[in-house]
Image (cartoon, grey):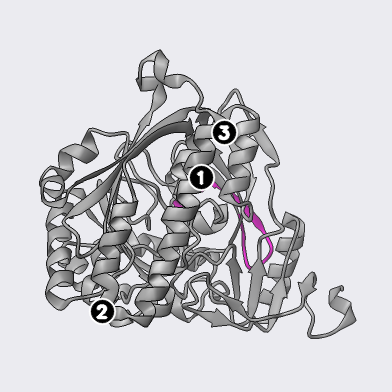
Amino acid sequence: MNEASSPDTLPGETTAQEWTTWGRTHSVTPRHVLRPSSVPELAEGVAAAARRGLGVRAVGAGCSFSALPLAPDVLVDLRDLSGVPDVDVEGQRVTVLAGTSIRELNEELDAVGLAATNLPDSDWQTIGGAIATGTHGTGLGFGSLSAQVEALTLVTARGELLECSEQERPELFQAARTGLGALGVVASVTLACEPSFRLHAAEIREPLGQLVDTLGSRMAGADHFEFFWMPGTPSAQTRILTRLHKLPESYTRPGSPVARTVRRLDDALLRNTLTAGLNQLATVLPRSTPGLNRFDALTNSPRQYSDLSFRVFTVPRRVRFVSTEYAVPVEELATAFRALQTLIERRGYAFSLPVDVRCSPAEDPWLSPAHGRETGWIALRQYWRRYDPKVFAAAEQVFLAHGGRPHWGCVHTQDAEYLHSVYPRFQDFLDVRAQVDPDGVFLNDHVRRLLAL
């Protein structure tokens, strides 16, 4: 349907339906939905919407738990804007369209002997959404997807395509690498890659107190380190990933198909299906939560395995949940975790999913939660049917006391006044945003509150 067919129709418009985030935290029925399959279609649709004074927000897989992607006027669904138009094997970089899922990217890279340096644990997110929110993996030597971006193409409200990198429009580049969707619609990004590699994973149950006491050295001593603590239990499950080119040659043999099948069954049955069932039971019988947590923790037995990097970085996520996550200076991480543990135990909060603790190196993008400092991450999750915002709000007070920065895609209650205090380049971001989108086409109510606009 073209624009001339109706005065109310945008070019490339499709049927508008209710759109809901994966965690069921927010929903909206937009006035218009665009689903472009090419960059020219995207630019045409955005420009037409802006000319009519409509707000525009782009969405991907709906992985955000915050109201960041809500689009009451024009929702741009990027899922058809996917693919890898250019791969430079020798230069170890790839250009990928913003609606491409991390899973699709991994498959394309593996086919040519390349891999992403680090990945978040969910591979169904889109590249555009992951970059907009600063989504990350773990490891003090390996940055988030935003940090891996070497260049990007931004569609402005006028339908212009702005190319930016460290050499071309460097300020726009640092703003757009974690841009919250507030500068324009990211159409494509160029990511730095590396030759394919394997990871060895060791998942071990350890006493919680001893682990937290040595947390700094444990994170510094591993390529990729994280731990999971089930509230109400005295131990945690550590997950240590080692890049296999650092191990003896005997460790580089591929894992057998049988071993991979056993691991997938373990993931599917014990670490997803059982967890989902226990959460459903805890919803009906809340007082059973501590005992169910102890049982769930016991079922996650120690294991070791190796595989291609992207098959180890990412894990199945079949239990629907709502999450808050904060980034604190890594030197504050152990203290902040202990304060959170005390809060949970003192108030008897019934979390039925584990608390996840990870780490990141200092990053350059201005609104990366890891900007300018080595960072520890603490993520809390609630089963979606038991989501209680008051619990997350109480945990936020712990994070704020340690200079925490919220994950942009997770539940939080911070506004521009606080964000100014913890982001040194916050005003620079506001200035660049005002230059590229002076009319506020790419804002929604949530972003206006974040940026005081």
**Upstream in the sequence, badge 1 or badge 2?**
1
Side of 121 where 334 appears, left or right: left
> Pointer 3: what residue?
93
Q: Which amino acid does label 3 sit on?
A: Arg
Distance between the alpha carbons at the discs numbered 3 and 2:
52 Å
Answer whether labels 1 and 2 touch (C-beta < 8 Å): no
Tell me the quarter of the picture where residue 37 sits: bottom right
**Upstream in the sequence, badge 1 or badge 3?**
3
Q: What residue type is labelled 2?
A: Arg
**Upstream in the sequence, badge 3 or badge 2?**
3
* Quarter of the rendering occupied by the C terminus: bottom left
- Residue 2, position in %: x, y? 86, 73
Q: What residue type is labelled 1?
A: Arg
Q: Can residue 225 be seen in this view?
A: yes
**Nearer-the-camera pick, 72 or 312:** 312
In the current view of this chain or complex, which residue is farthest to the right?
5
Where 88 sits versus 448, above or below?
above
Q: Give the range drawn in magenta.
A: 154-172
Q: Which residue is drawn at 29% across and 70% down?
A: 351
* Quarter of the rendering occupied by the N terminus: bottom right
> Pointer 2: what residue?
287
Where 359 sits versus 409, above or below?
above
Q: Residue 413 carries which label?
A: none
Magenta stretch contains residue 164 = yes
Magenta stretch contains residue 169 = yes
**Crowd around label 2: few <14 · some 14–19 · many ≥20 (10 Å):** few
**Nearer-the-camera pick, 391 or 59:** 391
Q: Which residue is drawn at 71% across and 62% down?
A: 43
- Residue 88, position in %: x, y? 63, 29
**Crowd around label 1: few <14 · some 14–19 · many ≥20 (10 Å):** some
- Residue 154, position in %: x, y? 60, 56
Where 309 sits versus 153, above or below?
above
